[in-house]
Image: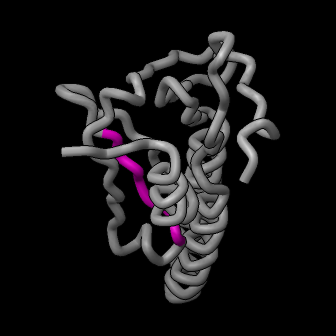
Amino acid sequence: MGSSTLSPPAWLTLADSEQVWVRTAPSRNLVLAALATGFVLLLVMSVTVSAMDDLQTGRAVSFTVLLLIVGLLVVAFLITKRNEYVLTSDRVCTGVGLRSKRVTAVAVRDVQDVTVEQSTWQQLVNVGTVRFVAGGDDLRFSLVGNPVYLQQQVFQFVDITD
C-alpha cells in the first residue's frame, strides 16, 4: 500500500515531510444495519397493527414506527458523514463535524498502544473502534469497517514499544 496515493482531507494541513498513511471514516455498514433494523420494525408493526381493532391506534403506531425508522437512517447516515480519521507519519487525527471539523490529534511517537473494541452487534456488521492510547490521551476511530484489519495497517506504521 503506497502512502503517496492518499491525500489529506481538506481540514488537515500537513507539515512538509508529513505523509498520510491511513484515511478512513465510519463504515457505511451502519446504514445497512439501520435498514435491516427498520425492516424488522416494519414486520413487527404490521403484525401488531393487524391484531388491533382500533384503526386510529393502528395508524398512530404505524406513523410512530415509520418516524423511528427514518430517525435511525438519518442518525446512521450522519455518523458516516460527520466523522473522518487520518493516520499520518506524525499524527493520529480525528475530524468531527459536517461543515467544519473539530480536529483532535496526538503525536504518533506518543502512541503506546492500539486496541480494537467490538461489541457483539458490531461484530455482526463488521465494525468497531480502534483505540489509540497516548499517555493520558485516548483517540478513537469509532465505528470503522473491519477494525482488526485497520489495526494491522496501523501496526505497519506505528512502532509500539514497551
Q: Is residue 22 above or below residue 148?
A: above
Q: Which is nearer the eye, 61 or 100?
A: 100
Q: Is residue 91 above or below residue 52?
A: above
Q: Residue at x 57, y 30 (%)?
A: 88
Residue 138 position by quadrant = top left
Q: Please provide percent x and percent y for residue 34.
A: 59, 63
The answer to whether 129 is drawn above or below residue 96 in the figure is below
Q: In the image shown, does 64 or 79 lie closer to the viewer?
A: 79
Q: Please identify the dominant SS of the magenta region.
A: strand
Q: Position of residue 84 (x, y in %)?
A: 60, 35
Q: Is residue 1 left or right of residue 144?
A: right
Percent x, y for residue 21?
A: 63, 39
Which one is nearer the viewer's eye here, 41 or 54?
A: 41
Task: Pick the quarter of the image with the C terminus.
Answer: top left
Whether residue 59 is visible: no
Left or right of 44 in this view: 158: left
User: Which residue appears at 33% of the width and 67% of the height?
Assistant: 119
Locate the N terminus and report the quarter of the image it occupies.
bottom right
- Residue 74 lies in what quarter of the image? top right
Instruction: List x then y, in percent, for residue 110.
Output: 31, 27
Does the magenta portion include 32?
no
At 66% from the left and 46% from the top, the residue drawn is 77
Instruction: Give the colour scheme of this rendering.
Output: one colour
- The residue positioned 56% from the left and 79% from the top of the image is 40
Between 134 and 94, the one lying in front of the other is 134
Q: Is residue 127 magenta?
A: yes
